[in-house]
Image (cartoon, rainbow, N blue to C red):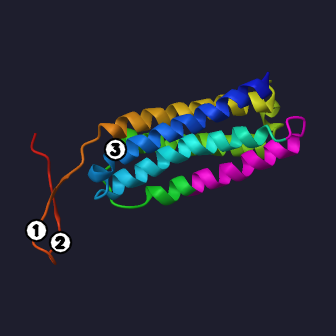
Amino acid sequence: MLVDFYGAFAPISFTILGLWFIVVHTRHADWAGSHEHRRTASVVALQFGLPGLMSLLSLVSPSSHLMWRVAFSVSSLVGPAALLALSFGPAGQPRLLGAGRAVSLGLFILVGIIAVAPGTLGDVGIHVVPLQAEATLLSLLVFVGLTVAWLLLFAEVPLRVHVAPGQAEVDVPDRS
């Protein structure tokens, strides 16, 4: 059953990632001047790409617990590190986008904990197969990514006033 789940989840994640690339491409002109939009677009890409990668790597050797544990552990280190690196910068992001980052960070950490120490689930009274718990967390991670993507798609981008060559551009607050 889990092989079927991960076999379907990996291509779904990569398809959503590809669709996200199209969205980013269509909004590139709007987002190019906004550090916050570029950072958040990168976070969304991680939220789609890393779960797909983890799912794909879990299928390399479905009978080996070591392979999925290593893949999920490494990805769960890369995910939070990238999310934290992308979170530093100017303030002013919508709160829901920041909350999406925080939830994703927590989900990546939980995936890592289960991958490193699968027995922890039983220790806290949760009696499920670790790969089932991971599947649930990855599904939630992609859902949070979809939510953040939706919010970012409609987030306002400050207008840029173009000035003479050699002078800096200026952000103008939207008055609509």
Q: Residue 32 or 109: which is nearer the viewer?
A: 32
Residue 169 versus residue 77 in the image, above or below: below
Q: CA distance from mark 2 to mark 1?
A: 7 Å
Q: Position of residue 127 (x, y in %)?
A: 80, 24
Q: Amino acid at mark 1?
A: Val
In the picture, the disc for residue 168 is: 2
- Residue 30 seen in the current view: yes
Is residue 143 found left or right of 1 in the rendered image? left
Residue 121 image-quadrant placement: top right
Give the residue at the far top of this rendering. 1
Is residue 155 found left or right of 163 in the rendered image? right
In this view, the mark in front (1 or 3): 3
Q: Earlier in the sequence, mark 1 or mark 3?
A: 3
Q: Which residues are magenta?
A: 61-81
Q: Quadrant of the N terminus?
A: top right
Name the residue that disc number 3 marks: 26
The residue at 52%/30% (across/down) is: 143
Marks 2 & 1, CB-CB < 8 Å contact: yes
Q: Residue 59 or 143: which is nearer the viewer?
A: 59
The reply to whether the magenta stretch includes residue 100 is no
Classify mark 3: helix, strand or loop: helix
Name the residue that disc number 1 marks: 163
